[in-house]
Image (spheres, rainbow, N blue to C red):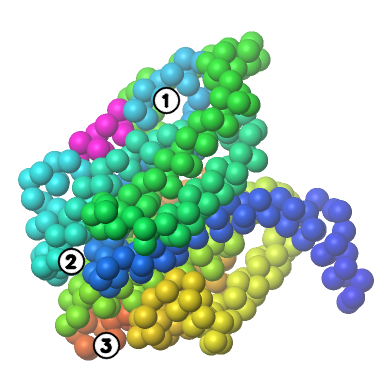
Amino acid sequence: MRHKFSSFAFSRTDYSIFMQFRFYFPLICMAIILNSTGTFVNAALARLPSPIVYISAYSVAHGFMSMFQSPLHLISPTVASLADNAPNYRQVREFAVILTIIIAALMIVFLVTGLTRAIFAEAFHLSGTTLDEAVRIFAVFILYPLGLLLKDFNQGIMIKFSKTWLMPVCSLVRVLTLMLLVAAVSHLSFIPAAILAGGILITSLYADGLTSLIGIRATVKNVVKAFEERDSVIQRNTLTVSGIWRFYWPLIITSFFSTLNMPIINTALGQTPDPNVTISVFSVAWGLYSLIVSPVTEFYQVPIGFIKPGEPETECAVRRFALLLGAFVTVLFVVIGFTPAGMHILTEWIRVDLTIANLAQRVIRVAAVLPFIIVFIQYLTGVMMKNQTTKPLSKGKAVNLLTLALILLIALLLGADMAIAGITAVVGASVAELFYLYISAKTILSLQ
């Protein structure tokens, strides 16, 4: 038994845990760095006057903004997939710019027509200062699409030219910028608080995007010329904007579904007697949750890279790695949720008050069951992508959203603690998605 484990864990075979970990570690680093942004933003907001107001307003504005931004998050894989020569690169770039302009224009329309204020007031039940500040923060977020385009488009070029080592470097610059802003926020009282709250995220995003651009200029240099140098060995197949759109729109639907979780949860939290406190509690807990769970969020790439058709031992090895990774992340949740270390992080690092910290720690305790669920959702996602069967993925996300909404509705009707109900709904929705993907995967594999 000891020999078998040693062989599995430490051997240099193509699918040992050592090889899987070596492949996955850079992705873990990037995911942790990116997912730490929510915690750092909350730490900065907690240092503003009336922190409950600004954490609540920021959470609603950011969740609503994320719905608009969801199409842009697929720019990176689109560049990597379609930009295989200079003409195609230009077409993808044109498509990305047009899409960014459309999204920014939609955000402006929602803001100037009063739709944003109406939605925040009616759907999220914000009022008074919290409503006014949420609208102002959303106005700052109109700068977000350009920054996201700058970051994700250049990341697609990194993937295309095998410069992926730049990604965690750019993400680290983003987090360092956030840390600097957290330290300086108490000295920036001359800036209106809403602009400061939204500007924290925008500044860090642009730091990431500009670092990505500098990295590409330093390594790839002239991208068009780099493609032309490779063009002699790549078949020319010039794209059109309409052709890119046909490739892109199914990805938009999947990405859009993924961004609806927080607006749905915030809508339910807004129905409570004290929505400011409830939304603030969940926002703080969710930021910490996102950071802790980040090591499993990119796991789908492991089955893509290591599972080999006709070799069932590779599937077993990847599932074992998933179990070990899920167990490790679960231990982190237990430490944060059930020990004084978690309270220290909430009150001293993030610096929320004791009431918010106690309630947020209760949310983290419920979330401790999620790592195993999420890592196996990621595993099945990778298996389906490996088999080029992606339709069940969007359907699984739809099952997730319907289950989430149903559990939240039941909780509201029963008068439950909505912060706890919110994370319980996330758990139930994830279980439903996992079950659907498991059944779908079994069906697909049985037909092959």
Range of the magenta residues? 98-106
The question of residue 67 being in magenta is answered with no
Q: Relative to 34, is 264 on the left or the right?
A: left
Say what amino acid the circle numbered 2 marks: Thr
In terms of depth relative to the viewer, which is nearer, 83 or 43? 43
Q: Which SS class for mark 1?
A: helix
What is the number of the mark on residue 92?
1
CA gap, disc 2 to disc 3? 24 Å
Eyeballing the image, is 17 above or below 234? below
Under mark 1, the amino acid is Val
Task: Report which residue position mark 3 lands on.
Answer: 416
Tell me if residue 153 comes above or below residue 2 in the rendering.
Answer: above
Asked if the residues shown at circle 3 and circle 1 are in contact, with their CB atoms under 8 angstroms apart, the answer is no
Q: CA distance from mark 1 to mark 2?
A: 40 Å
Is the residue under label 2 in contact with that under label 1 (CB below 8 Å)? no
Please state if 163 lies on the left or on the right of 276 as rendered: right
Tag 2, which secondary structure? helix
Q: Amino acid at mark 3?
A: Ala
Q: CA distance from mark 3 to mark 1?
A: 48 Å
Residue at image location 65% in from the left, 40% down from the top: 165
Query: Helix or strand or loop: what does disc 3 sit on?
Result: loop
Instruction: Residue 73: tell me if it is visible.
Output: no
Residue 196 location, x and y as percent?
30, 54
**Compared to 258, does 433 lie above or below?**
below
Which residue position is annotated with label 2?
Answer: 130
Residue 54 appears in the rendering: yes
Viewer-closest of 120 and 250: 120
Q: Earlier in the sequence, mark 3 or mark 1?
A: 1
Q: Which residue occupies the foreground of this view, 250 or 152?
A: 152
